[in-house]
Amino acid sequence: MTFPVSPTRNSSWIASQALTRIGAASVDNPPAAEDLALALDRLDVVASNLQGRGVLYVADLDTTPVAIAHELASALALSLMPDFGDETPQGQGALPTQAQIDTNLKRITADLVGYGPQVVSYF
């Protein structure tokens, strides 16, 4: 039996993974519709924040490459923690800090074609 493999993940997958990482959902406890709606709304804010800080630009959150989707789920989970009553300081829990997520995203996307101002160096 073969299993379908996709190189991308969609926004619903990212949102449900973020809710799972903070304990608001699990295999036996799927996310509530309100929680999923909150996570999807917050995902747009997280993506805009990353773009505004020059870390990452994702043109379509419904075709996000897998490695980037995992990091976006962690960033979204950090953003959702206070909404679910978790006031754990960054770096004290199981989730990476925002700085670590930013570094991972920059490392993942380092070899991708970039658009915008290019820094030129001469030998």
Image: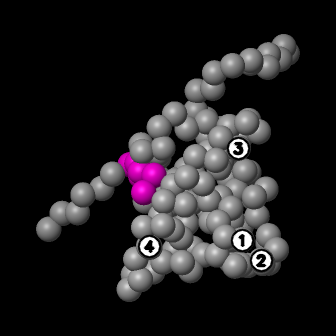
Q: CA distance from mark 3 to mark 4?
A: 25 Å
Q: Which residue is under mark 4?
A: 32
Looking at the image, residue 90 sits to the left or right of residue 114; the answer is right
Work out whether 35 lies above or below 75: below
Sequence-first disc among 3 and 2: 3
Closer to us: mark 4 or mark 2?
A: 4
Q: Which residue is under mark 1?
A: 82
Horizontal and vertical percent position of residue 22? 60, 75
* Magenta-highlighted residues: 7-12
Looking at the image, residue 3 sits to the left or right of residue 88; the answer is left
C-beta proximity under 8 Å, tags 1 and 2: yes
Sequence-first disc among 1 and 2: 1
Sequence-first disc among 1 and 3: 3
Residue visible at 51% across and 74% down in the picture = 20
Q: Amino acid at mark 1?
A: Pro
Dot 1: element:
helix
Q: Which residue is under mark 2?
A: 87
Sequence-first disc among 4 and 2: 4
